Image (cartoon, grey):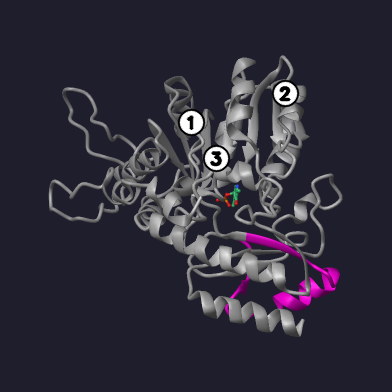
Amino acid sequence: MAPEEVHEQHDGFATQAIHVGQAPDPQTGAVSVPIYQTSTYAQPVEGGAGPYVYARSSNPTRAALEAALAALDGGAHALAFASGLGAASTVLLALATGDHVVCSDDVYGGIYRLLTKVFVRQGLQVDFVDVGDPDQVAAAIRPETKLVWLESPTNPLLKLADIAAISRLARARGVRTLVDNTFASPFFQRPLALGADLVLYSTTKYLGGHSDAVGGALVTSDPELYAQLKFLQNAVGAVPGPFDSWLILRGVKTLAHRMRAHEANAQAIARFLLEHPAVAEVFYPGLEQHPQHALSRRQMRGFGGIVSFRLRGGAAAARALVGRTRLFTFAVSLGGVESLIEIPATMTHASTADTPLAVPPDLVRLSVGIEDQDDLLADLQQALDGA
Ligand SMILES: *Cc1c(COP(=O)(O)O)cnc(C)c1O
């Protein structure tokens, strides 16, 4: 797939990101959706309540964000949350004691912690399997299984799950499939079209895109699942405030353009790293060398902005490297316009230490930003040469 082919399939995406749910304000003509900073709404004494009663239940700024997010995933409904983990907790609260979840063994550290340290205590059963092999998912499904939890590409090793194959085999057994699509964003991957039931985002990352707000979202086209999750959104209360909803919505407007820029820079950096003598191994689905490159071309419309790599010099070389970059900021998180560098083993994935999910100590993860490509390459060059 040439980059032009990849992006041709996106007719309408950038337009929807700017317009769905975001018509000018009928009262004032404001073209930016107003921040409805209110907790409650005046109600007519006669004739029943309007659509807005209390802001945990609904808020017009949040509703605008939810409409836009649903459209970008080609879904019927979206729900916004205070964080990605708030969205994840709400999904898991739809399950009951004794229910079973089959989860990717290369999942975001916070999801692993949520499952094993919080929900297992509530009687949820979880098995972690290599979702790179659909047969392992099929083998792990049992009568109590209610949900298959996928992340693709995964964090931080950029492994892929065959979303269509797994959704199909799960559905045949009456099991729903959730895809954490935070890394790809809806611009590069649409899990609902591939057969998944539910899409989860940390909107803190690419959807917000400016490292200035924390948020989460769920998208689905299943009316029954939507009704259940909407009930829980209000009953549990992990909702975003109006200002954070507005910040995420503002970020969403430029998602298409940012994702193209993230990807172009990430492709160039992945190729540069492959050639560098200090680098032992590079993980990026856009490389022909990636073991699932063919699958990534099939189910993604682009390869994203995250690149991970291992260093020949081990953990000490990784620590030296992160101390030498000037443009890549040493920090957790990802998906913002600025480039970040981190060591998953001691930072984002510290909670998986001494577990089967532990990541190599010499692994470095880049969240490649949208700065000028030459500047990013020069920064990595000087840092690697000196480390
Ligand atoms: C950050 C992240 C989360 C958690 O989201 P928060 O907004 O930090 O709660 C979940 N999944 C993935 C893949 C993430 O990167």
Residue kind at label 3, given as amino acid type: Gln
* Between marks 1 and 3 in the image, the one whose residue lies nearer the viewer: 3
Q: Is residue 4 left or right of residue 198?
A: left
Label tally: 3
C-alpha gap between disc 3 and disc 2: 20 Å
Label located before the other in sequence (3 or 2):
2
Q: Is residue 242 left or right of residue 3?
A: left
Say which residue label 3 marks.
299
Can residue 207 be found in the magenta stretch? no
Some atom of ligand 1 lies within 8 Å of the CB belonging to the residue at label 2 = no
Answer whether residue 211 is visible to the viewer in this image.
no
* Between marks 3 and 2 in the image, the one whose residue lies nearer the viewer: 3
Say which residue label 2 marks.
138
Image coordinates of residue 350 in percent, x first then y, are: 76, 56
Residue kind at label 2, given as amino acid type: Ala
Answer whether residue 286 is visible to the viewer in this image.
yes
Residue occupying the point 26% across, 52% down:
33
Task: Label 3, secondary structure: give it.
Answer: helix
Label located before the other in sequence (1 or 3):
1
**What segment is highlighted magenta in the picture?**
307-333
Observer-nearest of 262 and 145: 262
**Which quadrant would residue 177 be assigned to in this image?**
top right
Q: Residues within 10 Å of mark 2 (few under 14, many from 20)?
A: some
Say which residue label 1 marks.
235
Observer-nearest of 336 and 195: 195
Image coordinates of residue 329 in percent, x first then y, are: 60, 74
Quadrant where the image shows the C terminus: bottom right
* Between marks 1 and 2 in the image, the one whose residue lies nearer the viewer: 2
Observer-nearest of 26 and 279: 279
Residue kind at label 1, given as amino acid type: Ala
Task: Label 2, secondary structure: give it.
Answer: helix
